Amino acid sequence: MYDRAMKLLLALYFFILAIIQMGLFFGIYHYYRSQNVVKPSPYWMGSLLISLAGLIVFGGGILTIDDIATPQFNFTIANALFYTAAVLQALFCFSLNRPIPRVFKIGFAISILVFLIIFEWLRNVATFEIRTAFMTILASTFYVWQIFEIRKKRMQEPSSQLSYLQYASSAELFFALGRLAIVVVSSFTIRQVEQIPQILILFTITQLVMNTLSYIAIGGYWAERIALANAKSRLENQEIKALLLERETLIGSLLKANKTASTGALSASIAHELNQPLGASSLNIQFLQKKLADGELNPGMQKEILDTLLADNQRAANIIRSLRSIFSESEVKSTKINVANLVQIVLDIVTPEVHSKNIQIALRLDPNLQIHANAGEIQQVILNLVNNAIQALASCAQADKRLTIEGAYVNDGIQISVADNGYGIPAEARAHLFELLSSTKTSGMGLGLWLCNHIVLRHGGSIWFEEAVGGGAKFIFQLPVESIEA
């Protein structure tokens, strides 16, 4: 009767500890599953789960055991579970300081199989005292390793929960060594449950309690890590918000400054576009004044000068009108235009400058090349491209300077190109050719090509750059025969 009550009491101790560890496991599992910042280590979670399984198996085995000297196979299973739990807990402590090498994982996995074989042999041939000594020596080895790793981690990162874990591991080591001392000094072989010394039972149960406290300390450590991570996250969020606010303030200031600078640069660019017709008008007026003062003005010369002044004035008006319509995004007013006539008007404008710079012009246009478009705007595109080619050739030292204008029907539209045999355009500048306020020239502010691109796009076309055959730059734009209304 006493033997049965003793078995029941011992089994109850193991079942109570298993229930406590089970509650700890499920409580921690559901808590950490909701966390995204810090996840629990699979080593100690696995150790806790296997430990409670070992307690249940061992407690159940106590209820059915008859001879402690030769217990059933379920005691081999229970002790193998305790050994596996100890291995995983030790690996967790090791992982606090460094990643676990793959060879460690493989080695300990093999050691579990080896332990199972050894303990099964001990179950059949060894006494209760030898098996207890074997288990306490193994456990003490793991406890010493755990304490060393925890102490090393605490030196790098102080933690109250790690301190509790170190104390619990030290207590486990103390009670494991105490059990070893008790079985060593025992003078008889224990074969029945009632023969187990009370002090040995007390040390065994207390060691298991300390083991449960170590799991609680590990859970507290990860809760501590989560609290620190959340505090750090809140601090980082506040810093990010402050940086974003500072960024918005800085962007606002830069936009104001950029708006002022862009407005001035755009005004200078427009003035540069108007400079050519206004400069030509100024020269003609001075020439007219000189002829009048010298009395050398005849009706034919007077008409020629006045017609030139009128054409220059019309050019300036067209530029202003085009810019006004472009920037107001008004509708494209299309008429049927002859491309050859537009090209000729442009050549008439640039002829004096072309002759002064010894530039040869090659003109290759398909006959009767016509489209529906805004004549003033398309003329502005051709004039800008021709002026760019002239300026490129003016800075070129070679004697044979050529400017080539070509036009032809392609698919459902026309394609016009303006090419020169100058130095070409640097590769790093080609990606930004058609951007506003971007220029590869020392004069001008980068409105010309952007304006060309804008006009061509308004007409439903496209414009691009290619390297000219033999060197130089070639700009090509393509327009549909029927203009697209903006």
Image (cartoon, rainbow, N blue to C red):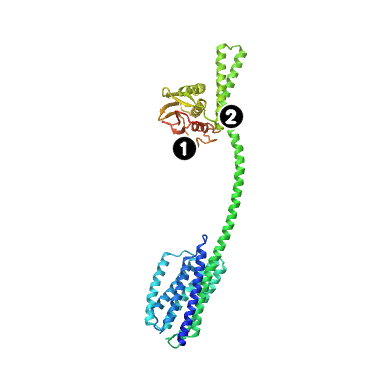
Q: Which mark is residue 315?
A: none
Q: Which mark is residue 271?
A: 2
Q: Secondary structure at mark 2?
A: helix
Residue 278 in percent (x, y) is at 58, 24
Q: Residues within 10 Å of mark 1 (few under 14, many from 20)?
A: few
Residue at which label 1 appears: 427
Amino acid identity at mark 1: Ala
Q: Quadrant of residue 270?
A: top right
418 versus 29 height, above or below: above
Considering every residue shown, the one lying at the far front of the view is 1
Residue 416 in percent (x, y) is at 44, 28
For discs 1 and 2, the disc positioned in front in the rendered view: 2
Q: Quadrant of residue 190?
A: bottom left
In terms of depth relative to the viewer, which is nearer, 120 or 461? 461
358 versus 193 height, above or below: above
Q: Earlier in the sequence, mark 1 or mark 2?
A: 2
Residue 375 in percent (x, y) is at 50, 25
456 versus 115 height, above or below: above
320 versus 127 height, above or below: above
Residue at 41 percent across and 70 percent down: it is 108
In terms of depth relative to the viewer, which is nearer, 154 or 1? 1
